[in-house]
Amino acid sequence: MKSLMELAKIREEAMKKVDIRNDREGTRIVVGMATCGISAGARPVLMAAVEEVRTRNLQEIVVSQTGCIGICRLEPLVEVYKQGEEKVTYVEMTADKMKRVIAEHIVNGKVVNEYTIGSVK
Amino acid sequence: MELYRSHVLVCGGTGCTSSGSISIEDALKTELAKHKLEKEVKMVRTGCFGLCEAGPIVIVYPEGAFYSQVKAEDISRITEEHLLKGRIVTDLLFKEAVVEDQVRSINEIDFYRKQKRVALRNCGVIDPEDITEYIAFDGYKALGKVLTEMTKEELIETIKKSGLRGRGGGGFPTGLKWEFTYKATGTQKYVVCNADEGDPGAFMDRSVLEGDPHALIEAMAIAGYAVGANQGYVYVRAEYPIAVHRLQIAIDQARENELLGKNIFDTGFDFDLEIRLGAGAFVCGEETALLNSIEGKRGMPRPRPPFPAIKGLWEKPTLLSNVETYANIPQIILNGAEWFAGIGTEKSKGTKVFALGGKINNTGLLEIPMGTTLREVIFEIGGGIPDGKAFKAVQTGGPSGGCIATEHLDTPIDYDNLISLGSMMGSGGMIVMDEDNCMVDIARFFLDFTVDESCGKCPPCRIGTKRMLELLDKITEGNGEDGDIEKLEKLAVNIKASSLCGLGQTAPNPVLSTIKYFRHEYEAHVYDKKCPSGVCQNLLNYVITNDCKGCTLCKKVCPVNAISGEVKKLHTISDACIKCGACVDKCPFKAIIKQ
């Protein structure tokens, strides 16, 4: 170690690795991962969320999973909990849709209406 | 770098390792591979979480789900349900983690809520064998700050202002020690860490070494800079294999990253660290005996002064502190002396780690702000006494400390309060006793330990403690005479006054404090030949009460044929009884009692 800069760099890299264990308040992205969700393709959606959070180096975001959310016909389901805002439920998700949700909703704060449960006919 | 969506932390402390956490790791590896989750879920072996009673412990993040007493067989369920499908397996959670069907995370559990973790902040959070995890949690930032921004004088002033006192037992102000060593003349100086933790039931230092070894390395390097030393030694007992192993890994990683070695942070400061193994003699926790042992001599104390700060290792000025003391240093540097001085009581600042054991529900390791009361520690964090029994006393400070009785439970814990109660802070062992413990027997147990561990150099300790033990043996065997208690007290005072080192000076404390608070128990042994708690075998009589139905089971089980009586008639026990207790366990009517 030759400088504080060097230490800070290692720290920044390592932070991403252990961030998940910190206590924090922030946004939660929850993917429905019951049998129905998994068979409908929830796993690639989950992985896309993790991947996207990492590449964008987003802080204060938890990607987690949950059991059956209930409307199995619309799986894979993703719920986004932002502090102080109503929960948003996205349906029939794919990895690409997930990336768009992160870009528009998580980063820019605009809900992607066309993917939400309300837009299903 | 790999990123995982979930981390599974498996406790790899000594407690959980001996209750099987290695087989849990193996099972988890197999299960993760089976479900192809290796790239999504990361397994981390951490240091001690503290709640050893509930071990082996597994924690799953991001939820913070706290699984306790996990068995290898449970891993397939946790993997399939929680890791694969996201459903927390509630019946495997720690009992307190489920309240009204709501799952609470680890930080919301009573045992942790009242704690404040400074020395233990990374224990159970990071992988101790990975230096980058330590760095992620602000590791080595304090060393960098000290070397590049602070003068030695500023650094020593910061430690002085923080009010930190030695955590090994003595409670000497750490900043002053640094200043003495800094001011001592000599070109070669040393920094030494006392990790020779010998109190029965104490494992604070072991947990820091196992769970956060880099914190010690960083702190010792900081101390080295302050006092002008370029070489450090960690004296640790060989009885701590996991701690030694992880510390060595940490030292190697620090060297690879040039955080130990030459020209650290390009400031021209050199510092290196070596481990010295001890063989586990209790007296080697005494600082002068410890230094002798590092030098390769027999571990025996020598008179002080000169103190190690003036003449220590190889007669050179030496800074010698305990593991927990060091573990506080990086946090004081990062958060400031005022922050640290803001925690605790007027004369005792910061937090203290205690190893809670004995008759207590939550056996384990906890860190509390100074000034927390004994009642809060025992009944809130510790969860009270098992089986609804009544609290009798708590022993603090191990064999050097004393027992504190019920009437002092609301005393705030700090160095001075504990001393005024006839006990001491010690290194932080805390053994809880309930109504079934005989205080004379407890005093005898601790004295037996110190007699065994006395190095024999000075007569008061070598001969005096032996005489005390003989008196206690006599009393517990039912041969106590009028005047024995007074003899014990007199001997105790003389041994304390005339022993060479801390071992002898404190060895009589358990006896003195139990006489102080439980004199009636001693008197019952000596004058009434009775052990009120029913512990001392020779003072017990087994008696059959009128509840006896004459079933003859006791008569059949008695190994010495001391029970007589006919079928369906009251049985009696004769003097031939050897007090083995076999009949008590056998009697279906609970008709045999100890008196």
Image (tube, rainbow, N blue to C red):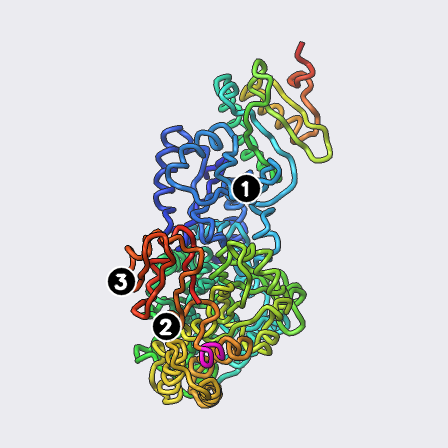
Whether the magenta-drawn stretch holds residue B524 is answered as yes
Say which residue appears at 49% left-offset and 32% top-offset.
B82
Task: Using the rendered image of the protein, determine whether residue B269 is visible from the camera's viewpoint.
Answer: no
Say which residue appears at 59% left-offset and 50% top-offset.
B110
* In this rendering, the label closer to the viewer, 2 or 3: 3
**Foreground of the two, B68 or B107:** B68
Q: Position of residue A14 (x, y in %)?
A: 50, 46
Q: Which residue is tagged 1?
A: B64
Which label was assigned to residue B561?
3
The tag earlier along the polypeptide, 1 or 2, is 1
The tag earlier along the polypeptide, 1 or 3, is 1
- B98 left or right of B78 in image: right
* In this rendering, the label closer to the viewer, 1 or 2: 2
* In this rendering, the label closer to the viewer, 1 or 3: 3
Q: Is residue B123 depicted above or below B313 in this figure?
A: above
Q: CA distance from mark 1 to mark 3?
A: 59 Å
